[in-house]
Amino acid sequence: MKKVGIIMGSDSDLPVVEKAVAVLKELEIPYEAHVYSAHRTPDEATDFSRNAEQNGFGVIISVAGMAAHLGGVIAANTTLPVIGVPCKSSVLDGMDALLSTVMMPSGIPVATVAIGGGANAALLAAEMLALSDGELSEKLKAKRESDKAKVLEKDKAVQEKLR
């Protein structure tokens, strides 16, 4: 199975990364996580993305706040799918990161999930990998059924409470 690369621009992004890692672990998807800044360590970010495919990665998740150029730097240096996760900051509540991540120029796409959406980034990465991995596809279907059952249990509890 291909690995998922997770690159965060700062260790302050770790809480969002931990949400992604929890999903990847649940689905038994191998991953690596690194701190590489688009601005402070551009050579390392570029080197990682240029070599990601030959190093066994199938998807890269980019997690960054504020200017959030990391996803674009990574996407500019690989043809692997890149999923951007904008992070909330103390200044603009993550809107700056959201716009920096989603407004990529034509030819360099970065799929973007919600501000702080680490779990959905991991699920999207899993769905991408599942296109060529039937076992992973079945795990995703089972997870959806499990999630559905949990919601229906909550519905049942609410219905009982309101009678």
Image: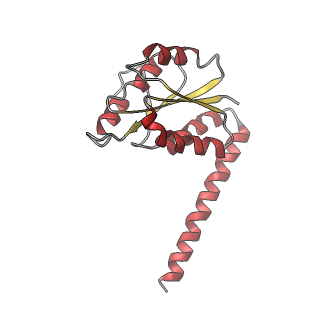
State whether residue 41 is above or below residue 60. Answer: above
Quadrant for residue 89, please give it: top left
Q: Which residue is drawn at 42% across and 36% down?
A: 12
State whether residue 84 is above or below residue 37. Answer: below
Quadrant for residue 71, please give it: top left
Q: Report whether 26 appears left or right of 83.
A: right
Rendered image coloring scheme: secondary structure
Please tell me which residue lies in front, 91 or 85: 91
Q: Position of residue 131 (x, y in %)?
A: 64, 34
Please tell me which residue lies in front, 161 or 11: 11
Q: Can residue 33 be seen in this view?
A: yes
State whether residue 39 is above or below residue 149. Answer: above
Q: Which residue is drawn at 37% across and 32% down?
A: 102
Q: Where is residue 20 in the image (x, y as percent from the top left)?
A: 54, 41
Q: Report whether 112 appears left or right of 26.
A: left
- Taking the view exactly as shown, the residue that stands out farthest to the left is 91
